[in-house]
């Protein structure tokens, strides 16, 4: 083998190892991806295949929908401008969880159409709303945030 052939062999070998490493990383990350959905996205029949696996559901907690069940889990509904989805959560709700407030719940859709949450995230102050929730509410024309604040991050610039 000439020097030039050896150099090409090393370069192609390194590219092969790099390609294999990238493929392994992407495969590992694809299992950890959690997609954000609004109640309208989940209710739409065209999105049924996209609702499989782990999801983040965001919206406003429906007034009067929070109820504690016999097994100490909590059932409530999350809505956007068009639809509402029933959520069941078996853990302890955040202290700032209230009706009418923007939240994000992480979990899976059940065959009966309810969302089984294993994590519930609530806003931390009066100006914060999760970016995905604020953007979805703005698209639907129901955003009630302050005109001067930045709803995406909850910070004032």
Image (spheres, rainbow, N blue to C red):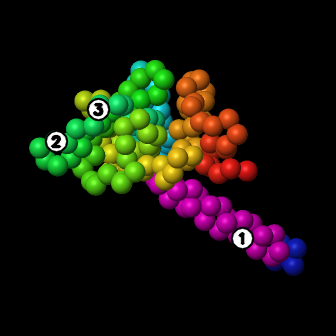
Q: Which of labels 1 and 3 is toward the front?
A: 3
Mark sitting earlier along the chain (2/1):
1
Check disc 1 and report the residue beneath it. Answer: 14
Please tell me whether residue 86 belongs to the stretch shown in magenta: no
* Predominant secondary structure, magenta span: helix
Front residue (pair 135, 2): 135
Please state, as top left, top right, bottom left or bottom right, where the N terminus lies in the image.
bottom right
Query: Which residue corresponds to the image point at 46% horizontal and 35% vertical from the top-left?
Result: 59
Q: Residues within 10 Å of mark 2 (few under 14, many from 20)?
A: few
Disc 1 and disc 3: Cα gap in Å?
A: 58 Å
Q: What stretch is highlighted in magenta?
A: 6-32
Q: Residue drawn at (49%, 53%), measured in percent from left and top?
A: 124
The kind of secondary structure element at disc 2 is loop
* Residue 114, position as x, y percentages in the image: 29, 33
Give the foreground label among 2 and 1.
Answer: 2
Q: Residue 31 at what x, y percent from top left?
A: 46, 53
How many residues crowd mark 1 within 10 Å: few (<14), some (14–19), many (20+)? few
């Amino acid at each position: 083998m000439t020097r030039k052939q050896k150099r090409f062999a090393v370069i192609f070998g390194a590219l092969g190892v790099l390609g294999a490493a990238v493929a392994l990383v992407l495969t590992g990350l694809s299992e950890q991806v959690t997609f954000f959905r609004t109640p309208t996205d989940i209710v739409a029949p065209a999105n049924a295949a996209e609702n499989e696996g782990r999801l983040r559901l965001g919206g406003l907690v429906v007034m009067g929908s929070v109820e504690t069940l016999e097994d100490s889990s909590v059932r409530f509904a999350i809505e956007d401008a068009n639809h509402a989805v029933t959520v069941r959560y078996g853990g302890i709700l955040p202290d700032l969880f209230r009706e009418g407030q923007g939240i994000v719940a992480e979990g899976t859709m059940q065959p009966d159409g309810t969302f089984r949450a294993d994590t519930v995230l609530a806003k931390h102050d009066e100006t914060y709303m999760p970016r995905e929730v604020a953007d979805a509410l703005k698209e639907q024309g129901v955003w009630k945030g302050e005109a001067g604040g930045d709803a995406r991050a909850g910070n004032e610039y």
